Amino acid sequence: MTIKVEKCIGVVDGGMLVLEESQTVALRGVRVPRVGVSGGSAMRTVLQRLVQDKQVSYEIRGRDRMGYPSISATVDGVDLSSKMVQALKDYGYSGYDG
């Protein structure tokens, strides 16, 4: 598979982002509370601070259960899936990660 690099132009929630080519993608192995559910907005903010307007290096690894491309991704050398799973644990949310 090919590693691509695109700017992140938006964040849907703590597990999905919108890339410059207007493609919405899901972080592989990350399940987060939806925005509007307890913790959803906090997880969205965590991801937004990590990726907004930054270059994301990613590789498509398949599709998630909703049909979005599932990606392994890094920003500035930081693995986004690992960072979000850790954020979920730090915030005390269990049952949502990978």
Image (spheres, rainbow, N blue to C red):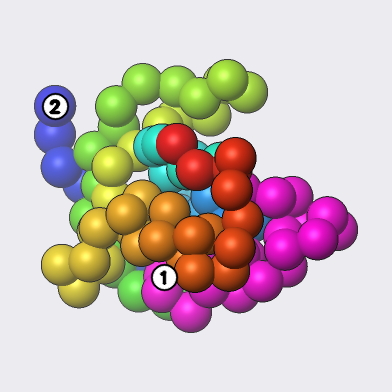
Residue 51: mark in rendering? 1
Residue at the spot 29% in from the left edge and 27% down from the top edge: 61
Taking the magenta stretch, the answer to whether it contains residue 40 is yes
Q: Amino acid at mark 1?
A: Val
Q: From the top left corner, tell me how far across and down residue 68 is, in percent.
A: 53, 29
Q: From the top left corner, tell me how far across and down residue 49 is, in percent.
A: 48, 79
Within 10 Å of the Cα at label 1, are there few (<14), some (14-19), or many (20+) other Cα atoms? Answer: many
All told, the count of numbered labels is: 2
The span shown in magenta is 32-51
Q: As drawn, is 61 to the left or to the right of 91?
A: left
Q: As drawn, is 37 to the left or to the right of 54?
A: right
Tell me if residue 85 comes above or below residue 70 in the rendering.
Answer: below
Q: Which residue is mark 2?
A: 1
Residue at the spot 22% in from the left edge and 66% down from the top edge: 78
Residue at the spot 44% in from the left edge and 30% down from the top edge: 69
**Visible residue check, residue 28:** yes
Q: From the top left corner, tell me how far across and down residue 56 is, in percent.
A: 30, 60
Q: Quadrant of residue 67?
A: top right
Q: Quadrant of the C terminus?
A: top left
Q: Quadrant of the N terminus?
A: top left
Tell me if residue 35 comes above or below residue 54 in the rendering.
Answer: above
Q: Amino acid at mark 2?
A: Met
Q: Main secondary structure of the magenta part?
A: helix
**Mark before the other along the chain sequence, 1 or 2:** 2
**Visible residue check, residue 84:** no
Q: Who is closer to the viewer here, 73 or 88?
A: 88
Q: Residue furthest right?
A: 36
Q: As drawn, is 93 to the left or to the right of 25?
A: right
Residue at the spot 28% in from the left edge and 42% down from the top edge: 72
Marks 1 and 2, how far apart at CA: 22 Å
